[in-house]
Image (cartoon, rainbow, N blue to C red):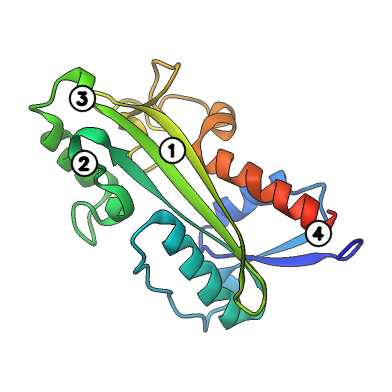
Amino acid sequence: MVNEELELLVATNNEGKVAELKKLLSDFPVRLRSLREFADASDVAETGKSFRENAALKAHGYALQTNLWALADDSGLEVAALDGAPGIFSARYAGENANDREKINKLLRELNEKQPAERFARFVCAMAIADEKGEIKFVAEGVCDGRISMEPRGNNGFGYDPIFIPEEFNETFGELSNDIKRQISHRARAFKQIIQYLRYFHAL
C-alpha cells in the first residue's frame, strides 16, 4: 500500500476522538471515517472477556459492515483492591444509564473501607485493526498505572478521570492538561503502537 491512501474506519460516533486521531495521523496518507457516516451500521456486541477481545470483536464486526479497514478500542479502569473491577464493565459499572458521577460514587463507596495503600489501579486500553474482510491484523494494549484519589478532583476528561492519579503525578487525570495525557495515557500508549504498525506495514 505504498503511496496509496488508506481508508480507515474509526469505530466510534465520537467526532472528538476522530479529530484527535486525525491530528496524530496528519503526516500520513490516511483518510479517517467515523461510524456517523454509516447510518445503517448496527452496534457490535461487546461479549468478550477482556479488553483485547472486545476491541477485536468491534474491529471485525464494523469492518465487515463497512468493507473498510477498521480501528476499534475498548478501555476501562482496573482497581486492585476490587479484584480488577470495574474492568471491562467500567462503562456500565453503576447501571446501563448511569452517568460518570454515579459510576465514580459507586467505586469510591466500595473503597471506603480500604487503606490508602490498597487504592492501586490502572487504566487499560486495547486497540485492534481489522482489514476490509474482518481479519484482525494487529492488536495493541496500553496501560497507565496509578491510584484512586480519596475524592473527585478536576473537570478535565471524562469517566473515571477525576479520581485517577497516574504514577509520578499528584494530580488526577481530571486536573492534568490534555497535552500531558496525550503523552502518558493508556490510549496514547496503545495508539503509539497502532501508528508504528501503520507506518511499518503500510509504509505510511
Which x, y percent locates residue 101?
A: 24, 42
Residue contact at pointers 3 and 2, CB within 8 angstroms? no
SS at mark 1 in the image: loop
Q: Is residue 57 left or right of residue 201?
A: left
SS at mark 2 in the image: loop
Point out which mark residue 202 bears.
4
Residue designated by label 2: 83
- In the rendered view, tell whether residue 21 sits above or below residue 12: above
Residue sitting at x 36%, y 65% = 48
Which x, y percent locates residue 57?
A: 47, 69
Residue designated by label 3: 118
Which x, y percent locates residue 12?
A: 52, 63
Amino acid identity at mark 1: Gly
| Mark earlier in primary sequence (1, 2) | 2
Characterize the local packing of mark 1: few (<14), some (14-19) or many (20 or more) Cα atoms within 10 angstroms: some
Q: How many marks?
A: 4
Residue designated by label 1: 157
| Mark earlier in primary sequence (4, 1) | 1
Amino acid identity at mark 4: His
CA distance separating discs 1 and 2: 25 Å
Amino acid identity at mark 2: Asp
| Mark earlier in primary sequence (2, 4) | 2
Amino acid identity at mark 3: Glu
CA distance separating discs 1 and 3: 24 Å
